[in-house]
Amino acid sequence: ASTLGASAAAKGRYFGAAIAASKLGDGTYANILKTEFTSVTPENEMKWDATEPSRGTFTYAAGDKILSTAQANGQKVRGHTLAWHSQMPSWAQALSGSTLRSAMLNHVTQVATHYRGKVYAWDVVNEAFADDGRGSRRNSTLQQTGNDWIEAAFKAARAADPNAKLCYNDYNTDGVNAKSTAVYNLVKDFKARGVPIDCVGFQSHLTNTAPSDYQANLQRFADLGVDVQITELDISGSGQAAAYAAVTKACLAVSRCTGITVWGIRDSDSWRTGTNPLLFDSSGKKKAAYTSVLNAL
Ligand code: XIL
């Protein structure tokens, strides 16, 4: 096939992009989005600060705009993200303990209810583990509400939207290491105890290369009985095209790897400013990395 989305579909996968509601009026952007991608993730529009800017007041206009654009294009939507230590509104940043716990759970319930039946997967919890080389939980105010905050968020999401796939999502978990093993143990424990979890997202913000055990890492999670997805792929540096092919092939080699999302469309859209980590250049032209992915699909 001649597009990322159609080629991925021929293999039973989606190929998605993170998008910004504010860019949908840009013709080049909108055209690539519609032509190449079969899934979208709102880059910021469904985060806590965007959807509940003051406590109990919910604002869905930007998220809804992404949803309706995706529906018009026949694309899936990955909801991102319900509970995360970053991009919390300032009112929530000021809370702690049981007050924060109930505000978080109310947030999960309200947002997942608003989008019930419309998003196929939610990143319920994002980035809850630390980078200390020991697989510790991140020391956030959410963590300080009690070690069970992650399962509480997943249970609230399941109750609000029983048909959405519920994912745990993180970075630096792309190979086998202490952090990914901590996530692995969390998923294993949830499965053993019947805590709802359906999928694990691997952000895959990479530089130069993919970890050599990338596929093996995806496979060990899949073997726990969850789907795996590449959720925020971008790759900077000299090995870019080859690393994109390696990630694509790794996903295709794992039957429960259901799709790949790149974190932006053009290099100029990337949050990794100045590193040109995406598949289209700033003028919207396909890069060598694009061709590498298309050939790998
Ligand atoms: C980033 C967005 O791309 C930026 O526009 C925003 O300023 C900060 O957040 N991990 C995630 C994403 O899960 O939500 C982050 O997105 C990138 C890192």
Image (cartoon, rainbow, N blue to C red):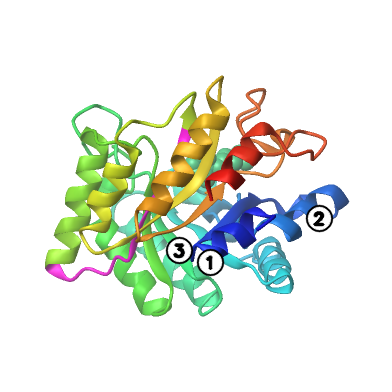
Say what amino acid the circle numbered 3 marks.
Trp
Secondary structure type for disc 1: loop
Residue at mark 1: 56
Q: Residues within 10 Å of mark 3 (few under 14, many from 20)?
A: many
Secondary structure type for disc 3: strand
Secondary structure type for disc 2: helix
Residue at image coords 52%, 23%: 239
Residue at mark 2: 31
Q: Are marks 1 and 3 in contact (CB under 8 Å)?
A: no
Q: Are marks 2 and 3 in contact (CB under 8 Å)?
A: no
| C-alpha gap between disc 1 and disc 3 | 21 Å
Of badges 2 and 3, nearer the viewer stands 2
| C-alpha gap between disc 2 and disc 3 | 26 Å
Residue at mark 3: 122
Of callouts 2 and 3, the N-terminal one: 2
Q: Residue furthest top?
A: 238
Residue at image coords 48%, 50%: 231
Instruction: Give 145 or 26, whichever is nearer the viewer.
Output: 26
Q: Which mark is residue 287?
A: none
Of badges 1 and 3, nearer the viewer stands 3
